[in-house]
Amino acid sequence: MRFTLDRRSTLVLKRAAGTRILCLGGTVWLSEIRPAADCVLGTGQSKLLDNDRDVVLGGLPDAQVAILSPTEPAP
């Protein structure tokens, strides 16, 4: 799934272990809930979610994002 995340919106992923978040353009902010752990991805960077915590995504200020399932190849 690919989409644009603007600075006024967020997306919450529930229990997304094994999912890869890929920043296709701009900057995306990720915040893992309990315990709090934040990271920022720039264009071309990705993060593999290795636990079942909820994750909040936001654009800084805007981001083009791909969410890849565990079996989906990177674009």
Image: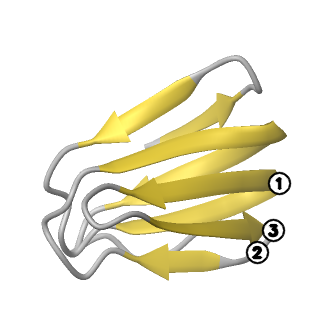
Residue located at (22% from left, 75% from top): 18
Left or right: 9 with respect to 15? right
CB contact under 8 Å: marks 2 and 3: yes
Q: How many marks?
A: 3
Q: In the displayed structure, would residue 45 be above or below residue 21?
A: below
Residue 25 is labelled as 1
**Judging from the image, what secondary structure is the residue with disc 2 in?**
loop
User: Which circle, 1 or 3, is nearer the viewer?
Assistant: 3
Residue located at (72% from left, 39% from top): 59
Q: Which residue occupies the foreground of this view, 70 or 47?
A: 47
Scheme of colours in the image: secondary structure
Image coordinates for residue 45, horizontal then vertical, percent: 70, 78
Q: CA distance from mark 1 to mark 3?
A: 7 Å
- Residue that numbered label 3 is attached to: 42
Residue located at (80% from left, 55% from top): 27
User: Which circle, 2 or 3, is nearer the viewer?
Assistant: 3
Image coordinates for residue 10, horizontal then vertical, percent: 53, 28
Crowding around mark 3 (Cα neighbors within 10 Å: few <14, some 14 to 19, many 20+) is some
Residue 44 is labelled as 2
